[in-house]
Image: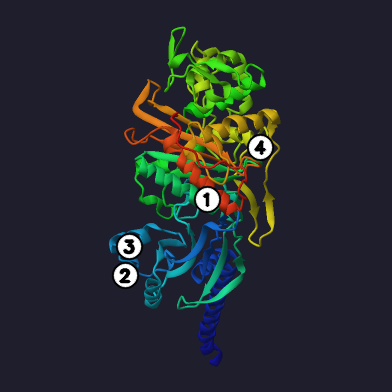
């Protein structure tokens, strides 16, 4: 009887035990599923919830002048970021950001929502320290501040066209900042932050830390003191003669090192966005990108070959036809009616007729060969991007006028850099040097990554010819010719003036009253240290437009400042300042 009663109880126990075993088996299966099948997904989700990856931007390298002065550097600023996946209420976070930053809450909320799955989103760069304190005290999950470098140009607009500028993300957009971006930018790192249940950061995961590599430093040949003098004197000339713009170059004739490269008007790269869209020409290094007709500054580059070829002799008299000469269908004239001038006087007084006759002696074939030898019609090779090769028409396009036009600096176009480079040959004994602007690349610890220097120049003139032109023609042009306003009391300056018309866009004639006045010269006479070119575009004609008037005085002051700064001793035999010549050019 008792055994009969216990059978139902035993079945119930067995059923309960079976249910318990089934539950345990199901739980074990679930655990296996979680720990094996779903482990990667769940671990990734946990890591996503517990960790945040914050990029560590590299500090952009410096751009420094030849004496170690910082032209472009990096400073630290506070910026605001968000990890949108950790922000519990994006609208409330937007309201907090709006109160602190003064930005529209609606737009901030839309930005946080649109960020989607991004883990690091920059909301505002360059906030005030007080704003950073307010935001950190608000302690909104998913919002925070961090320090990041930003580009700073401590000397403002100095050499801006050459330096260029960078984007808000630290990418070079123009000038050397763009050209040298691979050197300057460096490589970003990252850090991984582990957070507790309250989303507070408490630990930096060592395995998630990659240090940034700061960018390399770029050292230039430019000297900020000489650059400042060039920009100052060029600006004064632009203001005095109410000109559109101007360019000045200072080069070391023996090596081709560019000591200054000035463009006026310029811009402040710290605020480059403030300039209108139509002001893009301010950002362009016009000394290498914009060719122009050189006018009479070109005359030495035809006269010297004629002398070298034995086609003219020192002291030879050349009939300048009383200032008016018909050559075939062409009528040439001089500013002053000269009858006979010596070969030297043709240049010092800048006679167009005399130069046209010298050009006809040289002839088109030899003239074109010499243009190539001087480097005109080809890039100078300077280590800056965007250089133009200028315009030298091919031989088959020369007309009956070309052989007499080129000696006057017409029917071709050269860049200021090409003209300055070629003039260096008169100062260094006949060598055509390659101009260069970047001297070295340094690592952040100061070690040399790459070094650059002068390259051997090719001979364009025999040393004797170059020296004779320097002493007897170019020095005389400054002492008693068209360049008297470039003369210095303590140094012998030698050079050449020039005035050219500005062609219309499209090549149909010239702009009315549009001129470019230029001077290119060097000092001292013995072992010249500086070649200076000044070019003033579109001065107001009623005030003055000849190169000897608008450009020579600025070149004189740049030479005076530069030679004094370099500690060049005065020349004993330097002539005193002379009265202004009646000749103009």
Q: Nearer the viewer, mark 2 or mark 4?
A: 4
> Which residue is labeled 1 in the image?
561
**Secondary element type, mark 4:** loop
Above or below for 444 versus 456: below
Mark 2 and mark 4 lie on one chain; the one further toward the N terminus is: 2
User: Whole-percent x and y of residue 95?
Assistant: 30, 68
In three-dimensional space, the C-alpha distance between marks 3 and 4, rounded to whole angstroms, equals 67 Å
Query: Relative to the observer, which residue lies in front, 245 or 574?
Result: 574
Q: Position of residue 139 (x, y in %)?
A: 40, 76
Badge 4 is on which residue? 428
Please tell me how crowded label 3 is: few (under 14), some (14-19), or many (20+) other residues with Cα within 10 Å: many
Inter-mark Cα distance, 1 to 2: 62 Å
Residue in the picture at 71% in, 37% down: 456
Mark 4 and mark 1 lie on one chain; the one further toward the N terminus is 4
Residue placed under numbered mark 3 in the picture: 109
Residue at left offset 55%, top offset 16%: 318
Mark 1 or 2: in front is 1
Closer to the chain start, of discs 3 and 4, is 3
Per the model, the C-alpha gap separating discs 3 and 2 is 8 Å
Q: Is residue 450 left or right of residue 422?
A: right
Local secondary structure at mark 3: helix
Tell me the element at label 2.
helix
- C-alpha separation, residue under disc 3 versus residue under disc 1: 58 Å
| Measured Cα–Cα span from mark 4 to mark 1 | 21 Å
Q: Is residue 406 above or below residue 458?
A: above
Residues packed near mark 4 inside 10 Å, few (<14), some (14 to 19) or many (20 plus)? many
Residue identified by numbered label 2? 92
């Amino acid at each position: 009887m008792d055994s009969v009663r216990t059978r139902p109880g035993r079945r119930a126990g067995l059923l309960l035990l079976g249910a318990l075993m089934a539950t345990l088996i199901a739980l074990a299966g679930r655990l296996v599923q979680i720990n094996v099948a779903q482990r990667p997904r769940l671990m990734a989700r946990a890591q996503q919830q517990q960790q945040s990856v914050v990029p560590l931007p590299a500090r952009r390298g410096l751009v420094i002048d030849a004496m170690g002065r910082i032209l472009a550097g990096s400073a630290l600023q506070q910026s605001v970021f968000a990890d949108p996946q950790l922000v519990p209420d994006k609208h409330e976070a937007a309201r907090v950001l709006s109160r602190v930053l003064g930005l529209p809450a609606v737009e901030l909320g839309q930005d946080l929502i649109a960020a989607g799955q991004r883990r690091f989103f920059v909301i505002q760069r360059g906030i005030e320290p007080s704003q950073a304190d307010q935001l950190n005290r608000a302690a909104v999950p998913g919002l925070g501040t961090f320090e990041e470098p930003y580009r700073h140009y401590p000397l403002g607009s100095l050499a801006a066209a050459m330096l260029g500028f960078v984007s808000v993300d630290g990418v070079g957009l123009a000038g050397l900042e763009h050209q040298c971006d691979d050197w300057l930018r460096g490589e970003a790192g990252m850090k991984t932050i582990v957070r507790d249940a309250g989303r507070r950061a408490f630990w930096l995961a060592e395995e998630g830390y990659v240090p940034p590599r700061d960018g390399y430093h770029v050292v230039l040949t430019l000297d900020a003191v000489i650059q400042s003098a060039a920009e100052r004197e060029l600006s004064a000339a632009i203001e005095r003669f109410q000109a559109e713009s101007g360019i000045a170059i200072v080069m070391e004739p023996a090596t081709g090192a560019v000591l200054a490269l000035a463009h006026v008007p310029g811009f402040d790269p710290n605020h480059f966005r403030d300039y209108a869209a139509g002001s893009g020409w301010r950002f362009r290094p016009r000394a290498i990108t914009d060719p122009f007709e050189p006018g009479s500054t070109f005359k030495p580059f035809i006269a010297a070959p004629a002398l070298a070829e034995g086609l003219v002799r020192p002291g030879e008299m050349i009939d300048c036809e009383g200032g008016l000469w018909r050559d075939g269908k062409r009528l040439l004239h001089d500013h002053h009616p000269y009858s006979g001038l010596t070969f030297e006087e043709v240049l010092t007084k800048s006679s167009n007729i005399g130069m046209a006759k010298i050009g006809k002696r040289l002839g088109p074939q030899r003239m074109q060969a010499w243009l190539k030898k001087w480097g005109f019609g080809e890039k100078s090779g300077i280590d800056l991007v965007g250089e133009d090769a200028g315009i030298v028409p091919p031989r088959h396009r020369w007309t009956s006028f070309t052989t007499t036009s080129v000696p006057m600096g017409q029917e071709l176009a050269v860049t200021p850099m090409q003209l300055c480079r070629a003039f260096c040959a008169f100062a260094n004994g006949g060598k055509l040097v390659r101009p260069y602007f970047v001297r070295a690349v340094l690592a952040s610890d100061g070690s040399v990554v790459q070094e650059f220097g002068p390259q051997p120049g090719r001979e364009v003139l025999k040393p004797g010819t170059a020296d004779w032109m320097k002493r007897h023609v170019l020095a005389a042009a400054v002492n008693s010719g068209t360049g008297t306003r470039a003369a210095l009391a303590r140094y012998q300056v030698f050079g050449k003036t020039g005035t050219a018309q500005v062609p219309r866009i499209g090549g149909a004639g010239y702009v009315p009253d549009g001129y470019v006045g230029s001077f290119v010269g060097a000092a001292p006479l013995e072992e010249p240290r500086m070649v200076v070119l000044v070019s003033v575009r579109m001065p107001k004609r009623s005030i003055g437009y000849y190169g000897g008037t608008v450009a020579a005085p600025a070149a004189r002051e740049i030479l005076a400042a530069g030679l004094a700064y370099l500690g060049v001793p005065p020349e004993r035999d330097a002539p005193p300042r002379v009265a202004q010549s009646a000749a103009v050019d």
